Image (cartoon, rainbow, N blue to C red):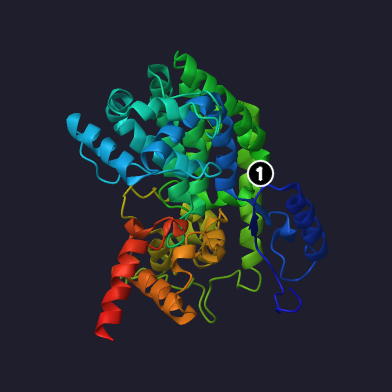
Amino acid sequence: MLEWGISSIFTITVDNASSNDTALDYLKRRTGHKDGAILENQFMHVRCCTDILNLIVSEGLKEVDDSIVKVRSAVKYVKSSPSRFEKFKYCMKREKLTFNGLLCLDVPTRWNSTFKMLEGAEKCRSAFELMEEYDEQFVSSLFDEKNDKKGLGPPTFADWERIRISLKFLELFYDAIMGLSGSLYVTSNMYVQEIYSIQMHLQDYRESGDYVLSAIAEKMMMKYNKYWGDLDRVNLLMFVAVILDPRTKLGALEFWFKDVLSVEQCTNMMKKLRHHLQKLYDHFNVGESSSQVEHGSIFPQGFSMNVEETENVSLHFMNRFHKYRAYKSDVQNKSEIERYLMEDVEKPNANFDILNWWKVNSTKFPILAQIARIVLAIPITTVASESAFCTGGRVLDSFRSSLAPGIVEALVCAQNWLGSKPLSSGNGYDTGMIDDAESYKLDSEITLKKMNILLEDD
């Protein structure tokens, strides 16, 4: 920090390793007393929400681990050679299924890739069942001791049912992570909404009556309660971000608190939020003029009387006084926070641009706009930064290591340009362009064809 000239830090987003807790506690102690510290840096530590979601999902997947291993082995067999893949495509055709690149092999340490594998395999379920009859080696090879677990064999009817059930909650978490890990739109105001939605779904699954689904949800709920069961463990700035969303404000939080907390806890939480929001406001309000009265005039800035001239001077004065008094009590004595919370919430809209809203209303709420500028910019996940520095999918295999470094750099750069989309020219952002940055892979066949064309041209 000293070397880079960083004088103050608002938040730091890290995963849930215990060493990070120690480091952030140390940093808060060392920087909390400095002039640039906001609220004494007590809310500096932001826990990566996708890391917590990964831990929750991984706990639930343990219930269907054997079924996942069987499906993985079946997919690995089909994709291990062109001849086996052709047999599988024949089975797809027999079952009147259209293959559109559904089948993919996962990375066992990344459950989101496991979800994509299971989702594709479940759609091809009937083709896998036909493979057991059509390909004699299919069953025997899956009992080979070279597989992940010896003797599991092909997926059974019960396995496919467990996979089908598990896909329900996996899709929920997959969509949540993809939404929260975006980097071209605001995500901090989504944090509380997503964890509330996940909590409600897990409770419904736990009480569904389905044995498999209840068992999965029970395990996941235990892990959920470890990190989010106590709302004091959630960074308070995430709640402030919800308040600064004009579609939710304070009412949405009160709605959630009443649903999950006791009356006393709800009251205390609301008081705590108002207190710290006021402290944030006071921090940014330092140096601002507390009076809006113009010099040389008893009326506040922007106030106009437009009172017609009258012969009764005394009545004219009283009218002016009462209008001034009403204006002062209704507007001037209310802070930006009160006036902001008093206004109606904006209607839900998929194309709502919260940054543009605050830009338009920054003249009405100048102090709150400053708070929104930093709170809404908080990264709630480390996915974007990890993906930016991750080399996964960009490492050359042995078949392409003969390419010159300059050519490799040009190909990677060109692929990035061709695979990306420009920002929307409108007021909002095109959220459809958000893709998993780690999913970019060099397609060897296409790239080699392009290289052959370049060589022929040369």
Quarter of the image that includes the C terminus: bottom left
Q: Is residue 155 left or right of residue 218?
A: left
Residue in view at x 26 percent, y 81 percent: 456
Residue in view at x 75 percent, y 71 percent: 35
Residue in view at x 53 percent, y 28 percent: 65
Residue in the foreground of this view, choosing between 402 and 204: 402
Residue in the foreground of this view, choosing between 382 and 44: 382
Reading the image, the residue beneath label 1 is 272
Whether residue 280 is visible to the viewer of this picture, yes or no, is yes
Q: Quadrant of residue 313?
A: bottom left
Q: Looking at numbered disc 1 in the image, what kind of residue is underneath it? A: Lys
Residue in the foreground of this view, choosing between 26 and 238: 26
Q: Is residue 55 above or below residue 163?
A: below
Residue 104, percent across and down? 38, 44
Residue 7, percent across and down? 72, 74
Q: What is the crowding at mark 1: few (fewer than 14 residues within 10 Å), some, or many (at least 20)?
A: few
Residue 247, percent across and down? 40, 48
Q: Is residue 252 above or below residue 156?
A: below
Quarter of the image that includes the N terminus: bottom right
Secondary structure beneath label 1 = helix
Residue in the foreground of this view, choosing between 232 and 135: 135
Q: Quadrant of residue 451?
A: bottom left
Residue 391, percent across and down? 53, 63
Q: Is residue 151 left or right of residue 320?
A: right
Q: Quadrant of residue 92?
A: top left
The mark tally for this picture is: 1
Whether residue 266 is visible to the viewer of this picture, yes or no, is no
Residue in view at x 52 percent, y 65 percent: 388
Q: Is residue 383 left or right of residue 306?
A: right
Q: Is residue 390 above or below residue 298?
A: above
> Farthest front residue?
136
